[in-house]
Amino acid sequence: MKTQAIIDKILSDAENRAKEIIENAERQAADTIRAAELLAEETYEKAKAEFGAVRAGVIDSRKMSADIQAKNIKAAKRAAVFEECFAAVLVKLENMPDAEYTRLVVRLMEKYAEDGDEVIISGSDRDILTPQFFFEYNTGHNGKVVFNGSYDKGFRKGFVLSNSRCDKNLKFNELMENLKDNWVD
């Protein structure tokens, strides 16, 4: 073989080898790029799913918080209306006409008085619940209660029945508080 043929053969072999290396490198580069693209797409989808889960969690948390706030507002409004209603009823009770008031006192005493109970009335009732009122009550109820003229200025309407065993607090403000505290919807 001639020198030129050897040189041509070496150059041809080198060129073929270079083409192989370049093709191999291009294939590896394409595979690496495809793998990187798949990884990027996978990472993007995973991040998107995680973001969706976090977003849903934040939305759920905010919904729960809003529900709790709404319930608290509703409960506060309800309590305010409840309070207002009981206050209005107490005002009506404390300002009822004398005839209605004495009928109510008689009904309460009929229900709660025991023989020998001492009656303590509000200082504001001196002109309504008089000794004569209790005399007339006792006439129709076999002398059930004792009125010694005891007045208490600490409440507006109602009375207390007292005996050696217990006191029955029938002050209107206390009755309303008790009713409110034991109210069941």
Image (tube, helix red, strand yellow):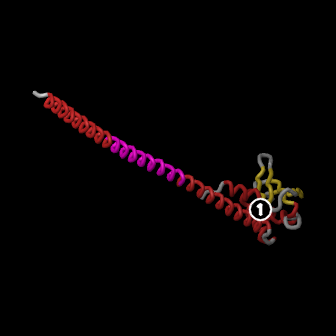
Residue at coordinates 83% horizontally, 56% vertically from top-left? 119
**Left or right relative to 149: residue 161:** left
Magenta run includes residue 128: no
Query: Dot 1: within a 10 Å radius of its alpha carbon, few (fewer than 14), some, or many (20 or more) residues?
Result: few
Quadrant position of residue 109: bottom right
Find residue 43 and report its horizontal and vertical position in percent: 39, 43
**Left or right relative to 123: residue 176:** left
**The C terminus lies in which quarter of the figure?**
bottom right
Residue at coordinates 17% horizontally, 34% vertically from top-left? 12
Q: Which residues are magenta?
A: 35-62
Which secondary structure is most common in the magenta stretch? helix
* On screen, residue 133 above or below 154: below
- Residue in the foreground of this view, choosing between 27 and 145: 27
What amino acid is labelled 1 in the image? His
SS of the residue under disc 1: loop
Residue at coordinates 75% horizontally, 64% vertically from top-left? 90
Find residue 93 and report its horizontal and vertical position in percent: 76, 66
- Residue in the foreground of this view, choosing between 8 and 161: 8
Residue at the far front in the pictured view: 3
Find residue 134 and report its horizontal and vertical position in percent: 83, 63
Quadrant position of residue 137: bottom right
Residue that carries the numbered disc 1 in the rendered image = 141
